[in-house]
Image (cartoon, rainbow, N blue to C red):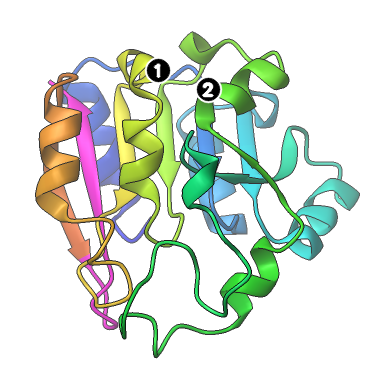
Amino acid sequence: MPFNLEGIKKYLQECNITVKGVLHVGSKSDNIQALYNSINVHDSNIIWVESDKVKAAKNIARGLPNCFTTVIDTVDKSILNYSTEKPPYCSDVCCNDSPKLILTELENSEILSLVEFMEKNNFDPSEFNIWNFDSMGSEFRIFQGSQELLKFADVIYTGVNSTEITKKSNRNSEIDTLLGQHGLRRVETIKNEDNWCMALYLRI
């Protein structure tokens, strides 16, 4: 997370949010793992979902529990066609600058909706109230297809990217509206040097 730890703790304290567990969809880093531990989340209460099989294998080899190689996406599998060179959420010229690595990482991976993933692995969604999603433009589709789970999320840190690569599928206003309907409000937006945005939503 590109904002400081004290800021996160401040939000949690101000909103009286008790951290139970973390659902992390996207690449893991040692820094983010340390951050979760520092807000009293034990490794056994963190779910790591990674589409890159090599990275996931390294996490498992290190003894990290709850590591999965799965693509979390829409319930409607009919729109997911990986036979082209572009990720399924891109069209026209929006992905001209997108690395081919994206497709390679997703090929032959299991694709599940968030609801399907939690049910398949026997996770109680009420035990994971902190969500961190960076899924390269599919965040809105994931949330839209798992609205019955949004009531369990007290904090969502998610991509709301504004670059050409994702603007077709992940418009900021759509995520704001959808999460707002479930009691979550955006309180902070972080833009990096590549114009990729992440946003923090809280149940206020």
In the rendered image, the vertical position of residue 3 relative to residue 5, given as above or below:
below
On the rendered image, what quadrant is the C terminus found in? top left
In the rendered image, the vertical position of residue 19 relative to residue 68, given as above or below:
above
The one nearer the camera, 155 or 74, is 74
According to the image, label 1 marks what residue? Answer: 149
Q: Position of residue 46 (x, y in %)?
A: 61, 31
Using the rendered view, name the quadrant where residue 31 is placed: bottom right
| Residue projecting furthest to the right | 61
The one nearer the camera, 122 or 32, is 122
For residue 148, side relative to residue 47 (left or right): left
Q: Amino acid at mark 1?
A: Leu
Q: Position of residue 120 (x, y in %)?
A: 71, 20
According to the image, label 2 marks what residue? Answer: 115
Q: Which residues are magenta?
A: 191-204
* Helix, strand or loop for disc 1: helix
Residue 37 forms part of the magenta stretch: no
Residue at horizontal 61 percent and vertical 65 percent from the top: 82
